[in-house]
Image: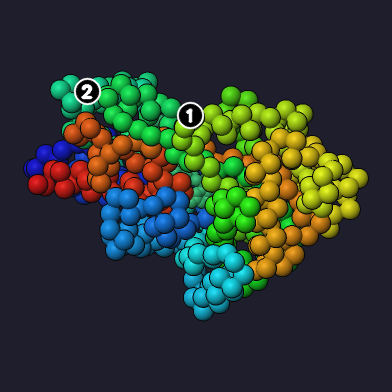
Amino acid sequence: MMILKKVIVVGAGPAGIFAAYELADKFQVIVLEAEDYVGGAGLHSDGKLNYNPFIGGNLTEFVTEDQAWSLIFKIREVFRELGVESSFHEEEQKRLEAHAVKSGLKFVKIIQSHIGSDHLPRVMEGLKEKLERKGVEIHLNTKATRILVEDDKAFSVQTNQGEFEADFFILAPGRAASNWLIEEMRRTGNGMSFNPIDIGVRIEVLNEVMEEITYKFKCWDPKFHIYTPSYDDFVRTFCTCPRGFVVREAYGEGLFGVNGHSMRDTGSPNVNFALLTKISLTEPLENTTEYGRRIAQLSNTIGGGKPILQRLGDLRAHRRSTWERIKRSYVEPTLRDVTPGDISMAYPSRIVKNVLESLEILDRVIPGVNSESTLIYAPEIKFYAMHIQTDNHLRTRISNLYVAGDGAGISRGIVGAAATGIIAARGIISQELV
Ligand SMILES: Cc1cc2nc3c(=O)[nH]c(=O)nc-3n(C[C@H](O)[C@H](O)[C@H](O)COP(=O)(O)OP(=O)(O)OC[C@H]3O[C@@H](n4cnc5c(N)ncnc54)[C@H](O)[C@@H]3O)c2cc1C
């Protein structure tokens, strides 16, 4: 019997799962997962899957565009086998694209699926079963603490359940554990750089305002890109939640913001989405995370320990919202544990201006979004991990140590993370077979 070489994958989020899936028939694969479930942050999302190599990261950093599309279609096929259908109404999306161009913004045509928070556990369980059927060993409640390296080669990983030796390692711990990954990379002498950050707000309007795009065109999470007139900043719509709910999200160390989610079988009368400005910093401060945390801190302070909620009409008129004024809105907030207030007290004026100008532009393709009644929640900040330096196979300077997923700062979404997992796995396959 042939003895297969061993690969340890740290993290059973989308990146780790798809890496293990790709490696399974060719190696003995062991997945170490700190929690008692698989799926990672993907399990806590509402499972909007964006099948596009330029959304949720940029896969052409590592592979050609053709290869990137083929990875995307492979991932779509795996989800399809688990009963996740995708939709793409090409004619409608083309029409919307043309309408957007004529209106001064860009609409990104995209194939999407929407699993829904209510169906995600079943899909993640299906992925786990697929792995187990292929012989992958999954160790839950097993947290990696240190990668042991000698002569620039990793030989073992220490965990709370003992030590695991292997021939190859893929670290895919997700963004929440990116500090651990950064520490391991520093210790092993690997380079890294800061990623940009997205700072913005969450918009909530009645479903009717976006229903044509979300339901008729089956474009669950429409991606609009805008360059704002005043600052020429890049603003985008992100994470649209049809019939959704705005929720509070912890950013760690006591800070919090908002996010959105939607289910497939039930819902609210509202749709919400994030409107995000991309911020890159150079001299003298490169640390975008630090900058974002300061803004979150100020927003949390102004909100008295709750997210801030403001009516668009109030923001425009330079006055704070009150519950009395919020009641005059046609939109009833789905998140009520908030403080009606004034976002411009907490946010840099540049971001506020970007929000106001973007809503004005968006209104040309989503009539009604720029109404007095539109609700705005803050803060919504997307922090990204530091970008770990690797070669195109996602191999670090340690010859048998690879990284994948959001924790390595190279993806920002389920499909993107999954694709980087496959790239790292193929890196190992090609290294071994050469
Ligand atoms: C609220 C929310 C909503 C989202 N909605 C969407 C969406 O609709 N669509 C979308 O595409 N993306 C969404 N995302 C983003 C998406 O979830 C992530 O991009 C994706 O899960 C990243 O995959 P990953 O495998 O890199 O990391 P993760 O999913 O974070 O998985 C990493 C895994 O590693 C484990 N781990 C960490 N450290 C260790 C360690 N030391 N030892 C062992 N195991 C460890 C973690 O427990 C975790 O299971 C959302 C994220 C959040 C937080």
- Position of 423 relative to 11 (above/below): below
Q: Nearer the viewer, residue 36 or 372?
A: 372
> Which SS class for mark 1?
loop
Q: What residue is disc 1 on?
A: 284
The percent coordinates of residue 432 (x first, y second) are: 13, 43
- The image shows residue 268 at horizontal and vertical percentages of 72, 56
Q: Position of residue 433 (x, y in %)?
A: 11, 47
Q: Residue furthest bottom?
A: 91
Instruction: Look at mark 2 in the image and give the residue it sits on.
Output: 149
Local crowd size for mark 2, using a 10 Å CA cut-off: few (<14), some (14–19), many (≥20)? some
Residue 59 placement, left or right of 270: left
- SS of the residue at dot 2? strand
Query: From this viewpoint, is residue 194 visible?
Result: yes
In terms of image quadrants, where is residue 78? bottom left
Q: Residue at x 39, y 52 (%)?
A: 58
Task: Looking at this view, name the residue that lies furthest to the right.
Answer: 324
Q: Amino acid at mark 2?
A: Val
Looking at the image, residue 175 sits to the left or right of residue 349; the answer is left
Could you tell whether 323 is left or right of 434 in the image? right
**Mark 1: few, some, or many residues within 10 Å (few <14, many ≥20)?**
few
Quarter of the image with the N terminus is: top left
